[in-house]
Amino acid sequence: MDYLELKITCLEDFREILIAELAEIGFDSFLETEEGVDAYAPEQEFDREAFLELIEKYKLPAQISWHESKMPKVNWNEEWEKNYDPIEVDDLVFVRASFHDPAPGFQYEIVINPKMSFGTGHHATTYQMLKHQAEIDHKGKRVLDVGSGTGILAIMAHLLEAQEIEAFDIDEWCVENGNENFDLNGLSTRMDIGTIREVNPQGKFDIILANINKNILLDEMEIYAELLDSKGFLLLSGFYTEDIEDLLECAAPLGLSLYKKNSKDNWAALILQKD
């Protein structure tokens, strides 16, 4: 069966919602790019009318343009091997796909099966979040991973001996994939599905991890502050260095102050601490 490849150019803030909506109309694989999203669907199952309606809905706000082509049946493992490289965080942790060989010299290893989309900021934001996690004592702590995706940060919390970990994501693919990755790494936690308002986690948490995007972080900042225990830490990434001030301005009235900041390839990461 041939696949249709739709190369969609769009604004960064709309990538996640486009992926979620495209998945609802028959697309089964995605790859985030610097320009937007590459989406794939079996040709025989492609609902062109639904696709065009979706594109029209977001064309102006997301500044969408797109190009369609056909490709033979895809071996997705091979595609991920081409597009996914391991993440090395100093000598701390080696994050590899199951099709990569282990590497010596790291304190920890995380193994994942990448069955979902990967963003252009994947390495930079994940790298910084993992590095910041290692700077915060997780032992015996209660940790919340918001928008867990492949589950890498929750797994790292487990390796750092967190006592209790809750994780969730809005995407069914992420939840399925994340739970597989939890199993691969000996984490018994099950990832939930929904937004933070729908999942409604019950605080207090010692550490909250949120590697999402600026708009969602700003929208949910008050919820994070409410869930965070006094002196607890909020680790944020998924936004650009020029967005740091906006996030700090939003956090300050909520009793969240800057503990540390970092940047890599123009992607930023913050550690905030609650008063």
Image (cartoon, rainbow, N blue to C red):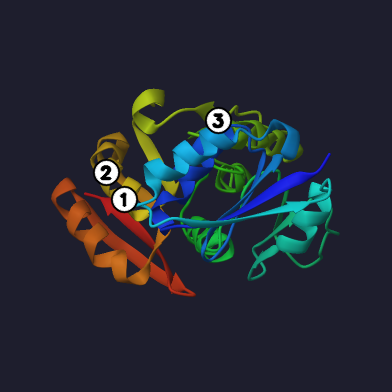
The dot on residue 215 is: 1
> Taking the image as drawn, is residue 230 in sight?
no
Q: Position of residue 249 (x, y in %)?
A: 18, 59
Residue at 83% from the left image edge and 50% from the top image edge: 72
Type of amino acid under label 2: Asp
Marks 3 and 2 sit apart, C-alpha to C-alpha, by: 25 Å
Observer-nearest of 10 and 162 = 10
Indicate which disc, 3 or 2, sits on the residue closer to the N terminus. Answer: 3
Type of amino acid under label 3: Glu
User: For mark 1, does the 10 Å Cα neighbourhood hold few (<14), some (14 to 19), or many (20 or more) residues?
Assistant: few
Marks 1 and 2 sit apart, C-alpha to C-alpha, by: 6 Å
Q: Is residue 244 left or right of residue 166?
A: left
Which type of secondary structure does the marked residue at label 3 adopt? helix
Indicate whether 185 appears above or below 61.
Answer: above
Q: Position of residue 268 (x, y in %)?
A: 41, 67
Residue at 35% from the left image edge and 66% from the top image edge: 260
Indicate whether 14 appears above or below 188.
Answer: below
Residue at 43% from the left image edge and 74% from the top image edge: 266
For mark 3, what is the residue?
A: 24
